[in-house]
Structures are given as structure tokens and as C-alpha cells.
Image (cartoon, helix red, strand yellow):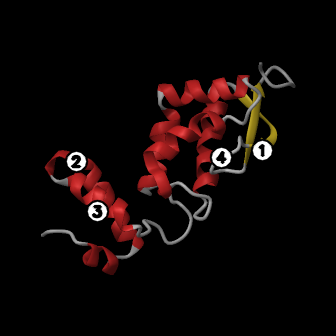
Amino acid sequence: MQMTIDKLRTMSPQDRATLYENARKRITQGGQEVIDLIDSSGLSLRSGGITLSDPVHIRMEEIIWSSEGKKLLVEATEAGLPALAGVEPLIVVDLGAQYSPHDLGTVDAGAIVGAVMRHLGYELGGRADMPAGSVAKTAATWHDRGTQKPRG
């Protein structure tokens, strides 16, 4: 069955999310075409906030937990920035408009960053503004568990 924009419009956001995830698993067997159609449609993959099974959440976890993602979190922290500031550009390049504050996507990204930072031995320090041009407006700052001030 050929997927079309009209068929996508008749699907629920959750059904589109399931289709997207199945297409991602079958990228070389026609999945890329389905992903491209969904991405270009502008149709939502969620009806509220992001769930743990949401393809956007799963992709953000992959990006943030990656070796590069963790390195960027630490670099941002050492520069006195919120950790999210380091990895958000990767998220934006990968997910584009699917990453936004309107569906709590930025909140979800912040929660994933928090899990990674705690795993890396950091403690919540507070909140700070994100750099100009960021999708998220504010995000958490972090410091080493044994100190009371930010690293760097």
C-alpha cells in the first residue's frame, strides 16, 4: 500500500508516530520515503506532550546519550552554559520542527539531559537563559557533585 498525504491526514497522531517508528526500523526497505512524507507533511506525531515511546523522544535520547552528545553537554557546562546548550544544535539539525516547546519537546530534552548529567556525576545547579537563537529559552545548569560551584 502506497502511503499518501491524504492517508496520513486520516490517521491519529499516535498512528502516525507508530508508522514513523516502523519506517525508521525499515529505512532501506522503503522506510525513508515514508519518513520523508511524514516529515514534509507538517502533521503531528503526538496529540499532547511527548511520551517515552514517541519517535521524537527516542531520537532525542539517542542524540543526547551519544558519545558526542555527552561531550557537548560537558563542554557547555564547563563554559558556564546550561548543558542543553551544547547538544540542542544537534537536536535541531536532526529533528527540525519536530523539536519545539509547544509540545513540551524542550522540556523532554531537558529531562533527558538531566538524566545524562546525573549519570556523569553532576548535580543540578540552577537555571539559566539559553544562548540567543536556541529553541529552549531556559535550561538547567550543573556542577560536579563534590563542589558547590559550576565547573570551568
Foreground residue, 112 or 97? 97
For badge 3, the amino acid type reads: Leu
Percent coordinates x, y for residue 105 in the rendering = 57, 56
Residue 41 horizontal side relative to residue 149, left or right? left
Mark positioned earlier in the residue sequence (3 or 4): 3
Q: What is the crowding at mark 3: few (fewer than 14 residues within 10 Å), some, or many (at least 20)?
A: some
Percent coordinates x, y for residue 53 in the rendering = 44, 56
Seen at 74% across and 41% down, the residue is 140
How far is mark 2 from mark 4, CA to CA? 32 Å
For badge 1, the amino acid type reads: Asp
Q: Which residue is mark 1?
A: 129
Residue 144 horizontal side relative to residue 92, left or right? right
How far is mark 2 from mark 3, CA to CA? 13 Å
Q: Which residue is mark 4?
A: 133
For badge 2, the amino acid type reads: Ile
Quarter of the picture holding the C terminus: top right
Mark 1 or mark 2, whichever is nearer to me: 1
Mark 2 or mark 4, whichever is nearer to me: 4
Q: Secondary structure at mark 2?
A: helix
How far is mark 1 from mark 4, CA to CA? 11 Å
Mark positioned earlier in the residue sequence (1 or 3): 3
Percent coordinates x, y for residue 57 in the rendering = 49, 51
Q: Which residue is mark 3?
A: 37
Q: Which disc number belongs to residue 27?
A: 2
Q: Secondary structure at mark 1?
A: strand
Seen at 71% across and 40% down, the residue is 131
Percent coordinates x, y for residue 54 in the rendering = 44, 57
How far is mark 1 from mark 2, CA to CA? 38 Å
Mark 1 or mark 4, whichever is nearer to me: 4
